[in-house]
């Protein structure tokens, strides 16, 4: 058997250790992972990690297959491998399967479930507390009953909003690969969205201005989703800027955009609020990320808005940029290909 041909045919880092305990063959992937110098070395000096060495030693001894883990760092990030050690004639074949993305996906799923449960548990705990009080101590207190019921209504609608945001996020994610095709006029969309948010803006004493081209700005898009983008961005501008500020929504002309490598339209929502500390900017589009979670929650925020926006923009093959500095307001710019 040509052992070099065997390791070369394996599409993963693979190496062979002979009965003299030296690494006799390694494929290019293994050399890349462990260094060229492992060839012809004793496996103990070539591989080093105690757990892996024990496993190989045991298989050399009793000729039965085993597996273990191998952790490494390529300078940029940790990588986790599952290592299979199997007997081969008189030698031993060792292969490395990269499980990093699998582990990351698992971690993300656990974080996500933990976040969702936490977000749901807070209003639920409040609701249960009030129900308990209404059944007992406040049973015949009409004033307390009305007050409690309206708090309960707020908490229940928070849960409702969270659940619909979650559903909307998973819908957008599910169809992210399908590029939308219906023609949408951004100018008209901005006008009608601003109109639908005018009461919210008035109540918060925030002015909404728009800078729009005279003619329609048509792109291939999904109108409902683009409306969702605008609603969240304008709502954020209103919610986080405070009374007396202005939110400006603008739609630019069609122009060549280097970031899109083609023609695109620029859509921007800018506020004159307190701004966001730059340290937060890279994480704003993560699910549940809030700069000041107490303040945001108070305003009914779930921290899912910008995550949804990002997925919608991705689906439209667009780009999103958030610029802000403390005291200088926030501007979110979206480039959409035409
Ligand atoms: N225009 C803005 N000015 C200041 N802070 C902002 C602005 N937009 C977003 N943020 C911050 O970014 C966080 C994330 O925004 P995002 O829209 O994702 O969530 P949310 O508004 O808290 O909740 P939701 O949009 O689901 O109601 C907000 O909690 C807020 O702290
Ligand atoms: Mg929001």
Image: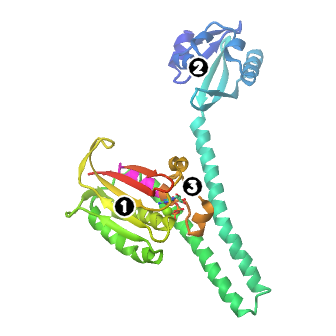
Does 81 appear in magenta?
Answer: no
Look at discs 1 and 3 and give the one toward the viewer.
Answer: 3
Element carrying mark 2: strand
Return the residue at label 3.
289
Residues under labels 1 and 2: Cα distance? 49 Å
Q: From the top left corner, tell me how far across and down residue 35 is, in percent.
A: 58, 15
Q: Mark 2 = which residue? A: 14
Q: Is mark 3 within 8 Å of ligand 1?
A: yes
- Residue 158 placement, left or right of 203: right
The disc, 1 or 3, on the residue closer to the chain's N-terminal end is 1
Please name the residue shown 52% across and 52% down the image. 284
Residue 76 position in % (x across, y down): 56, 30
Instruction: Name the residue located 58 percent from the left edge and 19 percent from the top edge.
Output: 14
Image mark for residue 287: none
Give me the disc on residue 226: 1
Task: Residue 48: name its quadrant.
Answer: top right
Magenta stretch in the rendered image = 308-318
Q: Secondary structure at mark 3?
A: loop
Q: Would you say the beta carbon of the disc 1 residue lies within 8 angstroms of ligand 2?
A: no
């Amino acid at each position: 058997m040509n052992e070099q041909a065997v390791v070369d045919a394996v599409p993963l880092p693979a190496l062979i250790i002979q009965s003299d305990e030296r690494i006799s063959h390694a494929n290019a992937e293994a050399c890349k992972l462990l260094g060229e110098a492992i060839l012809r070395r004793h496996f103990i000096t070539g591989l080093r990690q105690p757990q892996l060495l024990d496993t190989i030693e045991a298989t050399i001894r009793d000729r039965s297959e085993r597996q273990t883990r191998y952790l490494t760092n390529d300078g940029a990030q940790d990588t986790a491998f599952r290592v299979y050690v199997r007997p081969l004639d008189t030698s031993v074949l060792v292969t490395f399967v990269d499980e990093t993305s699998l582990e990351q996906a698992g971690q993300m799923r656990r974080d996500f479930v933990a976040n969702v449960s936490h977000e749901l548990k807070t209003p639920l705990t409040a609701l249960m507390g009030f129900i308990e009080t209404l059944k007992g101590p406040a049973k015949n207190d009409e004033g307390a009953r009305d007050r409690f019921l309206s708090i309960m209504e707020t908490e229940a609608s928070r849960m409702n909003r969270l659940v619909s945001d979650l559903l909307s996020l998973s819908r957008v994610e599910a169809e992210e690969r399908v590029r939308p095709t219906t023609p949408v006029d951004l100018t008209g969309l901005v006008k009608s969205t601003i109109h639908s948010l005018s009461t919210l803006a008035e109540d918060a004493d925030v002015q909404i201005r728009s800078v729009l081209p005279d003619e329609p700005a048509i792109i291939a898009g999904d109108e409902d989703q683009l409306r969702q983008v605008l609603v969240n961005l304008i709502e954020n501008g209103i919610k986080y800027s405070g009374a007396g500020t202005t939110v400006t929504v603008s739609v630019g002309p069609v122009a060549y955009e280097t970031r899109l490598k083609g023609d695109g339209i620029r859509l921007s929502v800018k506020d004159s609020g307190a701004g966001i500390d730059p340290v937060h900017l890279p994480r704003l589009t993560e699910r549940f990320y809030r700069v000041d979670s107490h303040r945001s929650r108070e305003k009914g925020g779930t921290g899912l808005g910008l995550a949804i926006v990002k997925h919608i923009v991705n689906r439209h093959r667009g780009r999103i940029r958030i610029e802000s500095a403390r005291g200088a307001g926030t501007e979110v710019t979206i480039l959409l290909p035409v």
